[in-house]
Image (cartoon, rainbow, N blue to C red):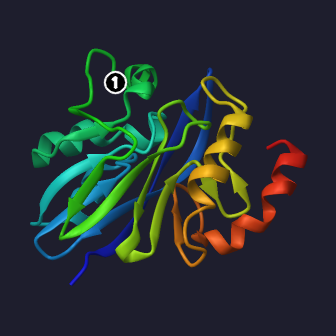
């Protein structure tokens, strides 16, 4: 039996370039009754730990280094013994939130993380952040897109360390090539699908965000 997908919504602030915004974040858990992987430990380590329960936490994956996706990671790691994983290109963002610390493991394009017998493939998808990654689980028909792809368009690229042409290339070349029936589990807001988003690419390019 393959892993199942669980979901916790946590709330807090996103802070960058001197600004602060109230946000709700999607925290995704992939696993079974014995073990589970957390994708983006946002805001509330206690709520995430409660969702993990007595299961073994095999890792804490950070889709990118913005504070609202990593701010609960050290506390969750401390309480569970799980290792924190981040692409090294986002170390500068990590250190802005957690100075004097580093993640436990580096993620790289092509890595495969396995939990509950299910493989999640790491796709490096820079643009929203230099080290942004998505996780693709073919067996689950699932893409965990972080802040790279949302319902209705790409993640924001108006702030430091982001770039619109780069995120467009990441989405076009790495995500929209996935099977069209793939469900996209995003970092904020509602789920979508590759089929729903792919036809909009040219419109996103034309509008510039």
Image coordinates for residue 1, horizontal then vertical, percent:
21, 84
Left or right: 171 in relation to 203: left
Q: Is residue 147 above or below residue 160?
A: below
Left or right: 162 in relation to 85: right
Image coordinates for residue 36, horizontal then vertical, percent:
20, 64
Image coordinates for residue 20, horizontal then vertical, percent:
60, 32
- The picture quadrant where one finds residue 85 is top left
Q: Residue at x 90, y 48 (%)?
A: 206
Q: Could you say whether the residue bearing mark 1 is in a helix, strand or loop?
A: loop
Q: Is residue 108 above or below residue 3?
A: above
On the image, numbered disc 1 is attached to which residue?
A: 98
In this view, the residue in front, 45 or 85, is 85
In this view, the residue in front, 136 or 86, is 136
Q: Dot 1 surroundings within 10 Å: few (below 14), some, or many (20 or more)?
A: some
Q: Is residue 165 above or below residue 57?
A: above
Q: Residue at x 24, y 36 (%)?
A: 74
């Amino acid at each position: 039996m393959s892993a199942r997908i669980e979901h916790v919504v946590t709330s807090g602030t996103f802070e960058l370039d001197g600004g602060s915004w109230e946000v709700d974040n999607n925290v995704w858990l992939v696993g079974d009754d014995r073990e589970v992987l957390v994708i983006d430990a946002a805001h509330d380590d206690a709520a995430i730990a409660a969702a993990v329960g007595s299961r073994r936490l095999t890792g804490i994956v950070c889709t990118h280094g913005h504070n609202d996706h990593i701010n609960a990671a050290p506390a969750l790691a401390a309480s569970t013994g799980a290792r924190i994983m981040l692409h090294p290109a986002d170390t500068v963002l990590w250190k802005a939130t957690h100075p004097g610390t580093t993640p436990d493991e580096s993620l790289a394009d092509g890595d495969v993380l396995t939990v509950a017998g299910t493989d999640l493939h790491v796709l490096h998808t820079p643009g929203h952040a230099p080290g942004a990654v998505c996780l693709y689980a073919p067996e689950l028909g699932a893409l965990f897109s972080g802040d790279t792809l949302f319902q209705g368009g790409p993640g924001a690229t108006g702030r430091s360390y982001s770039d619109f042409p780069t995120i467009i290339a990441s989405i076009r070349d790495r995500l929209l090539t996935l099977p069209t029936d793939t469900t996209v589990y995003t970092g904020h807001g509602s789920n979508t699908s590759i089929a729903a988003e792919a036809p909009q690419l040219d419109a996103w390019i034309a509008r510039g965000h």
